[in-house]
């Protein structure tokens, strides 16, 4: 995953990290997917990304249409997904999609945190 400064505040705050997990769970459930963070809970952005990759892999294997529904629910533009997948990278489909999901979910959490004060 490309380094992104937007993840730093979340990785440094237990409260924001927990909100990120809640946001991911909520959006996955609303899209008809389960990404249940059972103990042990992810304790880092890297752990979270691995779990997202697993969930994307499973969803893509069982019902690829759910990935599109998830992206819509999370509010990732179709153009963003197409551009990300078109970039020449060594990462797998699941790694790239999970990274896009994580970036957008982090952005949502940070925006809510900033504007709810």
Image (spheres, helix red, strand yellow):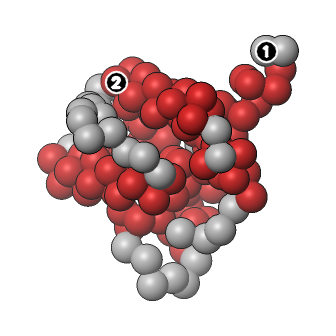
Q: Nearer the viewer, residue 36 or 61?
A: 36
- Side of 81 where 63 appears, left or right: left
Between circles 1 and 2, the one closer to the viewer is: 1
Residue 66 picture quarter:
top left
Disc 2: which residue: 29
Q: Is residue 31 above or below residue 76?
A: above
Disc 1: which residue: 116
The C terminus, quarter of image: top right
Residue 33 picture quarter:
top left
- Side of 27 where 58 appears, left or right: left
Q: In this view, does 102 lie above or below 35?
A: below
* Residue 75 visible in rendering: no
Q: Is residue 18 above or below residue 60?
A: above
| Label 1: which secondary element | loop
Q: Is residue 89 above or below residue 106?
A: below
Q: Position of residue 23 (x, y in %)?
A: 51, 28
Packing grade of label 2 (10 A; few <14, some 14-19, many >=20) is some
* Residue 80 visible in rendering: yes
């Amino acid at each position: 995953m490309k380094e992104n400064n937007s993840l730093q505040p979340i990785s440094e705050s237990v409260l924001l990290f927990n909100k990120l997990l809640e946001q991911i769970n909520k959006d996955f459930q609303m899209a008809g997917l389960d990404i249940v963070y059972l103990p042990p809970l992810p304790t880092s952005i890297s752990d979270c990304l691995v779990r997202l990759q697993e969930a994307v892999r499973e969803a893509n294997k069982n019902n690829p249409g759910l990935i599109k529904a998830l992206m819509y629910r999370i509010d990732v533009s179709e153009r963003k997904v197409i551009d990300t997948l078109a970039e020449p990278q060594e990462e797998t489909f699941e790694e790239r999609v999970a990274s896009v999901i994580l970036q957008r979910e982090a952005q949502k959490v940070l925006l809510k945190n900033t504007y709810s004060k």
